[in-house]
Amino acid sequence: MKAQREVTREEFLGLAQDGIRELFEIEQYKVFDGKKGAEQHYFVYEMKNHRCFLINLETCYELVTAFYTGDNKQLVIENLNAIALSVN
């Protein structure tokens, strides 16, 4: 799994100006969705280094599904680590 790109705090707030929902939290990560008008955006926030990554709907769906229905939380963490490492 990988991020589309890293976003700044200002970009995050702009892309989610009409509302933010926390979908889940695990270890040092939070996964959010946010709305700007009719557009929906998806984010992984890495709390240790305060970095935020824009992800696509498919990636978000896979993460949320694995978190809530899977028994392997370590795989979720590995996927989140891969997203954080995918952006230089």
Image (spheres, helix red, strand yellow):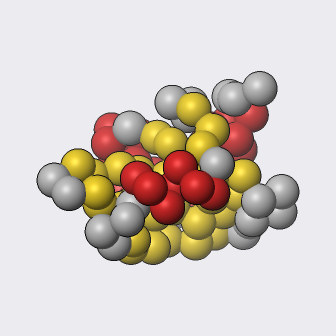
Q: Is residue 80 visible?
A: no
Residue at horizontal 63%, vertical 57%?
9
Numbered disc total = 0
Outermost residue toward the left in this view: 38
Res 58 quadrant in image: top left
Residue 83 in the image, given as x and y percentages of width and height: 63, 38
Vertical side of 80 occupied by 23: above or below:
below
Vertical side of 50 occupied by 63: above or below:
above
Vertical side of 86 occupied by 32: above or below:
below
Q: Is residue 54 left or right of residue 34?
A: right
Give the camera-side residue of 78 and 71.
78
Give the camera-side residue of 68 and 9.
9
Residue 32 in the image, given as x and y percentages of width and height: 46, 63
Residue 38 in the image, given as x and y percentages of width and height: 16, 53
Q: Is residue 70 left or right of residue 65?
A: right
The quadrant of the rendering that contains the N terminus is: top right
Residue at horizontal 28%, vertical 57%?
36
Residue at horizontal 77%, vertical 26%?
88
Q: Is residue 8 visible?
A: yes
Residue at horizontal 72%, vertical 52%?
51
Res 48 quadrant in image: bottom right
Q: Is residue 24 left or right of residue 26?
A: left
Vertical side of 10 occupied by 26: above or below:
below
